[in-house]
Image: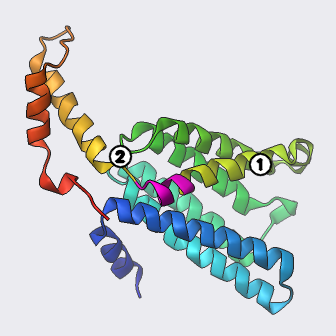
């Protein structure tokens, strides 16, 4: 299956369902990688690592599509960092002993954390946790720093990523809430004079609800 066909099929799936698929695949990738690293050796170890990487590629594409409406350019840049890091992971390249794959994962987490904070369909605290996780991964740019901060940098990285993807798996994304906030924001701008803020009335609230398209009610 080509990348274009895969992206087309991903785009046809509802946002909440995409979020839950991404959460489930992330957990599958982490469990596969951990099991392979701890209990499998030889060629099977390499095969298990490649399977985990392949699953994370799909997760990256799903996450890109989820956050594309927030900022397409930053979402694409985040996907680029993730895919480059996964390439290093698949090839097991560590120039000068630096785990480049984790470093790229750090940049990816920073961008996704910012996109979560800017979005209206996920709690902002998840964005903060993702940024903290990204900073933890970036400590691996320096082996002495990473060793000095271990295991706290590892724990912050795992906590940041796991909290976001567990939320996606259990809760999905609140698309209706996001569209509602956008509609309320537009009504606020229209109903107030320049330079003054006017609170929304019940009539404005009802009008905002009426402007929500039927497709905003996403079900699984």
**Marked residue nearer the N-terminal end (1 or 2):** 2
Q: Nearer the viewer, mark 1 or mark 2?
A: 1
On screen, residue 111 versus residue 87, left or right, reads left
Q: Residue at x 49, y 60 (%)?
A: 169
- Mark 1 to mark 2 CA distance (whole Å): 28 Å
171 drawn magenta: yes
In which quadrant is the N terminus drawn? Answer: bottom left
The residue that appears at 88% across and 51% down in the rendered structure is: 143
Q: Is residue 60 visible?
A: no
The quarter of the image holding the C terminus is bottom left
Q: Which mark is residue 70?
A: 2
As helix, strand or loop, the secondary structure at mark 2 comes to: loop
Task: Please name whichever residue, 166 or 70, is drawn nearer the observer in this view of the structure.
Answer: 166
Relative to 6, say whether 121 is above or below. above
Q: Examine the rendered structure and indicate whether residue 188 appears above or below residue 25.
A: above
**Quadrant of the rendered image containing residue 219:** bottom left
Residue 86: image location, x then y, percent: 64, 69
Badge 2: how crowded within 10 Å, few (<14), some, or many (20+)?
some
- Residue lying furthest top: 196
Question: For the magenta stretch, what is the residue range?
Answer: 166-172
């Amino acid at each position: 299956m080509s990348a274009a066909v895969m992206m087309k099929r991903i785009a046809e799936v509802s946002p909440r369902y995409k979020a839950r698929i991404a959460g489930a695949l992330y957990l599958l990738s982490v469990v596969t990688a951990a099991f392979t690293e701890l209990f499998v050796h030889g060629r099977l170890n390499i095969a298990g690592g490649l399977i985990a990487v392949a699953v994370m590629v799909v997760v990256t594409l799903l996450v890109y599509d989820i956050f594309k409406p927030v900022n397409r350019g930053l979402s694409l840049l985040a996907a680029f960092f993730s895919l480059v890091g996964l390439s290093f992971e698949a090839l097991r390249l560590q120039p000068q002993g630096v785990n480049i794959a984790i470093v790229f994962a750090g940049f990816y987490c920073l961008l996704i954390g910012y996109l979560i904070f800017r979005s209206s369909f996920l709690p902002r605290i998840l964005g903060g946790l993702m940024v903290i996780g990204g900073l933890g991964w970036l400590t691996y740019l320096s082996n002495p720093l990473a060793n000095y901060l271990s295991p706290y940098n590892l724990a912050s990285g795992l906590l940041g990523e796991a909290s976001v993807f567990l939320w996606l798996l259990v809760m999905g994304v609140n698309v209706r809430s996001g569209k509602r906030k956008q509609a309320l924001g537009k009504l606020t701008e229209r109903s107030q004079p320049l330079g003054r803020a006017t609170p929304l009335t019940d009539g404005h609230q009802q009008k905002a609800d009426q402007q929500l398209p039927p497709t905003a009610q996403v079900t699984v």
